[in-house]
Image: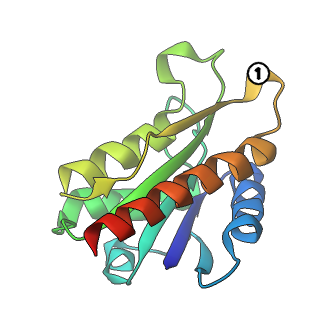
Amino acid sequence: MRITILIGTMTGTAQLCAQEMELALGEGDTQIEALLMDGLDASVFERDGVFLICTSTYGQGDVPDNARGLYEDLQKRRPDLSRVRYGVFGLGDRTYAETFNYGGKRFDDILSELGATRVGERYKHDASSGVLPEETAVQWCQEWAARLQQGNRAAV
């Protein structure tokens, strides 16, 4: 299995989570590549494999600055992503109730609109919970990968 982790971050927390997920998932036959979203466009989804969006939320519920180009390119070009499977690990702070975890939600919404299939539920980490996101990321991604494996076996 091939997994590309796409990282949207302002302060580095999403990148730290992605690194932990990369270590947790990079065993056996699984090939993992983590990419910061800086400079990426919609063509990144032409790669083989499954995608994991790991992103924080910034400002008034926006995607991080380094993810803006990719997000806007998806909105503008509107490619057919019907062959794409993905997961979302979102970071946010529930004290911003109206825009809590909107960075992940925005990517989830646009990918779904373009025909991609989300595997599992979108995870919404809450910074005000007191739980370290990188610890949650490892547990969540292992469950997510198990769900992917089940789906792969069912498709055979």
Residue type at numbered disc 1: Ser
Asked which colour scheme the image uses, the reply is rainbow
Residue placed under numbered mark 1 in the picture: 129
Residue density around tag 1, few if under 14, some if 14–19, many if 20 or more, within 10 Å: few
Vertical position of residue 21 compared to residue 32: above or below: above
Q: Position of residue 64 (x, y in %)?
A: 56, 49
User: Could you tell me which residue is drawn at 73 percent across and 41 percent down?
Assistant: 136
Residue 19 visible to an observer of this rendering: yes
- The x, y position of residue 22, in whole percent, is 70, 69
Classify residue 154 by image quadrant: bottom left
5 or 151, nearer to the observer: 151
Q: Position of residue 30 (x, y in %)?
A: 59, 80
Compared with residue 128, is residue 48 higher up or lower down, i.e. above or below? Answer: below
Residue, x 59% and y 62% (percent of image)?
A: 7
- Looking at the rendered image, the quarter that the C terminus falls into is bottom left
Find numbered disc 1 in the image and state the secondary structure of the residue it sits on.
Answer: helix
Location of residue 129 by image quarter: top right
The residue positioned 42% from the left and 38% from the top of the image is 105
Please state if 142 lies on the left or on the right of 71 as rendered.
right
